Amino acid sequence: MKYIFVVGGVMSGVGKGVASASIAKILQSRGYEVTSVKIDPYVNVDAGTMNPTEHGEVFVLDDGTECDQDMGNYERFLSRSLSGLNYMTTGSIYRSVINKERALFYKGKCVEVVPHIPLEVIEKINRAAEKSKAEIVIVEIGGTVGEYQNILFLEAIRMLEVKNPKDVLLALVSHLPYLNQDGELKTKPTQYAVRTLNSAGLHPDIIIARAFVPLDKKRKEKISFNSSIEEEDVISAPDVSSIYEIPLNFEKEKISDRLLAKLSLSPKGKNLTDFKKLNQAIKTAGQTVKIGIVGKYFGTGGFTLTDSYLSVIEAVRHAAAALHLKPSIDWLDAERPGSLGKYDGLIVPGGFGERGVAGKIKTISYAREHKIPLLGLCYGMQLMVVEFARNKAGLKKAHTTEADPGTPSPVIDLLPEQKEKMKKSDFGATMRLGAQPAAVKKGTLAHGAYRAESISERHRHRYEVNPDYVPALEKAGLVFSATSPNRRLMEIAELPRSKHPFFLGTQFHPEFKSWPLKAHPLFVSFLKAAAKK
């Protein structure tokens, strides 16, 4: 087994996730079987209970694991579904060790933070690699070097490196700030990040230097000299217009040749043709389509946090590239959506709670009445049902019990099993999660998009369309074009094309299964309709 660990220096959000995904994609293109693992330093057992404005999007895997958004990047770059084995947190590792101790796994030994926590980390990395039959595993360590929270994961690298010095590589993704008054990129913060790694008994083999422009030779020389690595091991990582350019930029710097040589692996052929074609399609896109995303997790202080809806945004971009369209995306606050008539298409994504519901329902009404293509995702689909029940089915006070527990017309409600969990305050990993099958009706928008009668999509929700109201909604003209195989759960709601060019909502999250080389069919259909408008 070969291991490549990726850590971040200087600041958070430096791009470790896309760097790790890019390295994985490049080595895959060189003919190696690879897999990716994310380690989050949080004591949370998983990402499911985290606020999106604090942590970013909660991504969901086929097996129902609620995890960090970087797992989505790994799947998108590798065009491959991953499992819960590929994700761990401080909380999950401690829980696993404690459960083993309770079961006498350690045979009466004194269980200590070191070595048992790092050893558990190594064991889980190996299990993930073995399951995917990987020759190389790329492991991203969350956080920034120097933080207390990730020091045990750095210790895991050190322990593994001691045992397997020729099989372990460490890549540092570090930021080079630019100070206008000096007119140059500063390398000193990166030098300090390297020294911080040294204090943990580690030294980077590769430094990926993030900056708003490509690195010049002088900066590479300074980093090389002060960090005791070869100049060729300093990889320039400038800002790009699309994250799918990153693997191509890395390969211009011959990163795979350096990695393979250091791991004593024989070089194989190169084939990044698929990403070259993808980037060409993005750069040569013609018609612009203006899309408004109406959400409530954009605001963080005086800034806009688009990471809360990362997969939705990427799914729009994937579909646009497939159709040679240029997407122009605006982030609209659900509490103050503003003017909507200028958009070619609107998306109401998932969410929780009462805040922003009124604005989302107004958006849905406007889109339905003015024939603007609308795609509702999870909570977005539920509010589409609420809006239709109120304005077309005669249920004036219809609502979801999530926002109004006392509504006389609960068209969206908890299932009985979810009610029991809520009574017990059992919130973590207890929603309807992961890949679930659905049956699609012929002759519908959904069937026209999928071209299939059976699908599987990823879920993350508790509330469902109340089956008691389905007959009244259908009589008023709403079509439930996909249901669970037993027809108990409504999976897709839509209006016929004769009534609206594209008015469709999904109870699931199709954005979680959209890849740059395989755009999701519902997003493709949505953007086609938006382009026609």
Image (tube, rainbow, N blue to C red):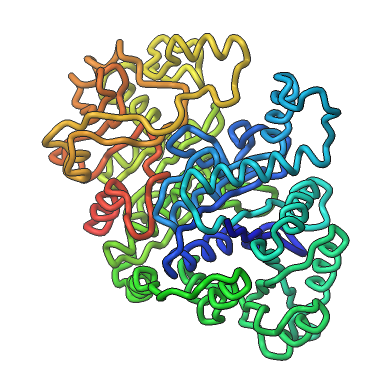
For residue 126, above or below residue 165: above
Out of 159 and 293, give the one closest to the viewer: 159
Q: How many marks?
A: 0
Which residue is pictured at 70% across the width and 84% down the height? Answer: 231
Q: Quadrant of residue 225?
A: bottom right
- Residue 180 in view (yes/no): no
Q: Quadrant of residue 421?
A: top right
Which residue is pictured at 32% across the width and 20% down the height? Answer: 489
- Residue 193 in view (yes/no): yes
In the rendering, at what x and y percent does residue 260 appear?
Answer: 56, 72
For residue 94, above or below residue 367: above
For residue 250, above or below residue 317: below
Looking at the rendered image, the quarter that the C terminus falls into is bottom left
Q: Is residue 217 shown left or right of residue 86? A: right
Out of 405 and 131, give the one closest to the viewer: 131
Which residue is pictured at 44% across the width and 20% down the height? Answer: 400
Q: Is residue 380 shown left or right of residue 494? A: right
In the rendering, at what x and y percent does residue 82 appear?
Answer: 47, 45
Q: Is residue 473 shown left or right of residue 149? A: left
In the rendering, at what x and y percent does residue 315 appear?
Answer: 39, 52
For residue 400, above or below residue 481: above
Looking at the rendered image, the quarter that the N terminus falls into is bottom right
Out of 301 and 235, give the one closest to the viewer: 235
Q: Which residue of the protein is positioned furthest toward the right in this rendering?
A: 199
Which residue is pictured at 40% across the width and 38% down the height? Answer: 509
In the rendering, at what x and y percent does residue 339 appear?
Answer: 43, 50
